[in-house]
Amino acid sequence: MGQTTFISVYILKSLFLVCLIYPGNILFALQADYPWLNHKYSSAESIKNRIAAPEGFKRVDVSTNTFDYWLRNMPLKKGKPVVYLYDGALKDNQQAQYAVVDIDIGSKNLQQCADAVIRLRAEYLFANKRSPLIHFNFTSGDKADFSKWIKGYRPKVRGNKVKWRLTANKDSSYRNFRKYLETVFMYAGSYSLRKELQEVKLLEDIKIGDVFIRGGFPGHAVIVIDMAIKIETGKKLILLAQSYMPAQDIHILKNPINRDSNPWFEIKGRDKLYTPKWTFEWSDLRRFWEDK
């Protein structure tokens, strides 16, 4: 191998490593991180690169391989697309979304508000090979472990009683993971999710991945997908994403208080958190269990 060829190969290998270490700056495929995608992922279409922090603010620092990082780098559909329902129909209100996350809805009326939050959390854990941490509670209070599902156990639900029986073959595939999520969507919701999440006692401690949630029939939930801060004052802004009823595209919300449709919400900017479809108390803030 000549010196010129050797140098060229070295440069190509170096660029490949840069793609792995600094993905936010390069166009590349991230199917491993976002396995539902059926096309190459472009970091130019990520939340981080599509939605700038307001003037005077900077995004909070996050570590790689965290839920915070994963959410911030989720892909968006190009342009300003409309929001579709699970059956292909258009959502009636097309004024609430600032952008639409590039993630499928499924063909059933299942992935609604709390389900979308569950979906994102579970997808992150699955992509990061943390399947043993994937577990959610049914409305009955029964725990649904993905690790149990992988082994072939399936729930038999009668009223508020759940029994797990070994009825399927062992399967750790992504396809089987999606079947697990469909079952969770059927038997979980805002009521059960709020009960299993941890209360965030100080609003000042808010972080990406936290959830504003009101449990009920119906209730609602939105997830914090990014955050920026003004260093001089400590003022914090957040981006929020949601699905709704019927099941629909996960979308980033406009802040209805901002005249320019700015999607950033100020923490403690008002007496409550006003979103286009729901009003939350600041005390509705909850957090997923800690990674271990």
Image (spheres, rainbow, N blue to C red):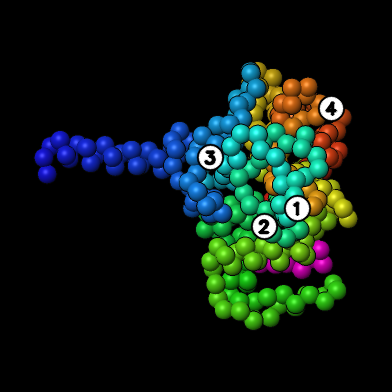
Question: Do the numbered discs 1 and 2 sit on residues whose CB atoms are within 8 Å?
Answer: yes
Residue indicated by mark 1: 247
Q: What residue type is labelled 2?
A: Gly
Q: In this view, does 96 lie above or below 67?
A: above
Question: Is tag 3's residue or tag 4's residue first in the polypeptide sequence?
Answer: 3
Residue indicated by mark 3: 63
* Image quadrant where residue 93 sits: top right
Q: State how far apart marks 3 and 4 are (Cα).
A: 30 Å
| On-image quarter of the C terminus | bottom right
Q: Which residue is drawn at 61% across and 79% down?
A: 168
In front: label 3 or label 4:
4
Q: State how far apart marks 3 and 1 are (Cα).
A: 32 Å
Residue indicated by mark 2: 106
**Label of residue 270 in the image:** 4
Q: From where the camera sits, is residue 196 visible?
A: no
Dot 1, how many residues are within 10 Å of its Cα: few (below 14), some (14-19), or many (20+)?
Answer: many
| Residue 130 image point, x, y percent | 55, 58
Q: What stretch is highlighted in magenta?
A: 136-145
Q: Which residue is drawn at 19% across and 36% down?
A: 7
